[in-house]
DNA sequence: CACTTGACCTGTCCGC
DNA sequence: TGCGGACAGGTCAAGT
């Protein structure tokens, strides 16, 4: 699920709530998703919540740290003490909490889903937690909790020595952050030149080239740059590369401003959905009319094993 | 070496 | 209404 904008949105939400708290307990319900020993970090304080690419990094007061990768369907949801162990379906919720929490019911959720897919989500809700896809629960010193949910169990929580983090295979080959100074148009030109026979879509999804792009933002960036996803990198003109560089930055900034994308599973740290898909131009719009040219029909095609969406008129 | 496929999991959606 | 197959935002290992 989560790409850079979603993971960054979760990071910001968690940072607001858990930095400075002590981790008092961890309940691991699905052992295989947890690598390392949870006991080794119980009793430590959360000193910061950081992100590199799609990886969340929880810095702690001791020598260890914890990383969480959400992969396709992982969620991290924080609940204040007042909501822990309370089922919103049966209780009047305290209006003091930050976001408007709606009573949870089948009807309510369906309505919410429709609104999100169609265009204008206005309400958020919190699912009763834990549920059957909750695989780890973190308890904090103020009574609040963080729940790790993952329908597909692809996500991983890892505890390791802080000094070993940069040496992990994931971080060793992770490319630059697209919204930081290490990512420049010149860098993009150089990297593209190394793999001239690769489709540009495949290049964008490779985390060693750029950290944090996934299927949604790769497709949206290519639309914005007016480049077809199966173009070989070696065929891109200098102008197209410049456009692509700008498009990546603009797409990610726009997605961050919308709190990310929610097609199905994604919610932020307090259970709210993101609204980016309501303004997406190609992603998940197969068969629909192109917003820009009003002539093209959005197409879908497998490239490097991943479905890619594009407008055959706007993109060349 | 470059590129593709399969595995990891569970759920949903689509066509017949 | 039921059933089988395709598909889903990511990453890594194995195969071609």
Image (spheres, coloured by chain):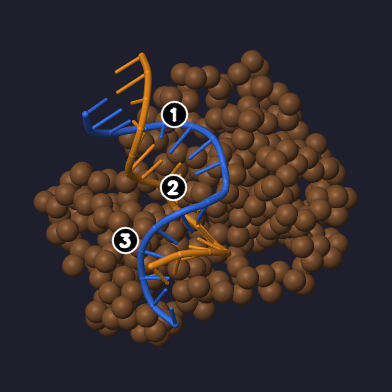
Chain colours: A brown, B blue, C orange
Q: Residue at x 20, y 63 (%)?
A: A315
Mark linked to residue A313:
none
Pinpoint the chain carrying mark 1: A
Mark 1 burial class by Cα count in 10 Å: few <14, some 14-19, many 20+? some
Residue for badge 1: A112
Using the rendered image of the protein, determine whether residue A74 is visible from the camera's viewpoint.
yes
Give the x, y percent position of residue A139.
79, 41
Q: Residue at x 27, y 45 (%)?
A: A285
- Among numbered discs 3 and 1, the one appearing first in the sequence: 1
Quadrant the C terminus of chain A occupies: bottom left
Q: Residue at x 60, y 50 (%)?
A: A155
Q: Residue furthest left?
A: A295
Gap between marks 1 and 2, in whole Å?
15 Å
Mark 2 burial class by Cα count in 10 Å: few <14, some 14-19, many 20+? many
Mark linked to residue A261:
2
Pinpoint the chain carrying mark 3: A
Whether labels 2 and 3 share one chain: yes
Residue A291 versus residue A212 in the image, above or below: above
């Amino acid at each position: 699920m989560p790409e850079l904008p979603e993971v960054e949105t979760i990071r910001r939400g968690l940072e607001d709530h858990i930095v400075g708290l002590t981790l008092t307990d961890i309940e691991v319900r699905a052992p295989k998703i947890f690598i390392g020993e949870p006991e080794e970090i119980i009793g430590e304080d959360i000193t910061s919540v950081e992100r590199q690419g799609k990886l969340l990094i929880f810095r702690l007061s001791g020598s260890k740290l914890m990383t969480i990768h959400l992969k396709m369907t992982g969620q991290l949801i924080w609940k204040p003490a007042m909501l822990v162990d309370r089922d919103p379906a049966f209780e009047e919720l305290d209006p003091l909490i930050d976001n408007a929490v709606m009573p949870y019911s089948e009807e309510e959720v369906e309505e919410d889903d429709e609104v999100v897919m169609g265009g204008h989500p206005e309400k958020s809700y919190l699912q009763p937690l834990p549920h059957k896809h909750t695989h780890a629960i973190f308890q904090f010193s103020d009574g609040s909790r963080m729940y790790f949910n993952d329908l597909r169990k692809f996500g991983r929580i890892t505890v390791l020595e802080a000094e070993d983090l940069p040496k992990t295979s994931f971080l060793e080959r992770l490319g630059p952050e697209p919204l930081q100074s290490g990512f420049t148009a010149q860098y993009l030109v150089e990297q593209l030149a190394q793999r001239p026979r690769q489709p540009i879509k495949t290049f964008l999804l490779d985390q060693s080239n750029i950290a944090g792009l996934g299927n949604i933002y790769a497709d949206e960036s290519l639309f914005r740059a007016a480049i077809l996803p199966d173009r070989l990198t070696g065929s891109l003109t200098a102008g197209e590369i410049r456009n692509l560089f700008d498009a990546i930055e603009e797409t990610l900034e726009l997605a961050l401003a919308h709190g990310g994308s929610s097609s199905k599973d994604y919610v932020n740290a307090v259970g709210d959905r993101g609204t980016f898909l309501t303004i997406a131009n190609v992603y998940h719009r197969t068969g629909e009319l192109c917003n820009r040219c009003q002539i093209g029909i959005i197409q879908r095609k497998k490239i490097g094993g991943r479905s890619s969406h594009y407008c055959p008129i706007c993109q060349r």
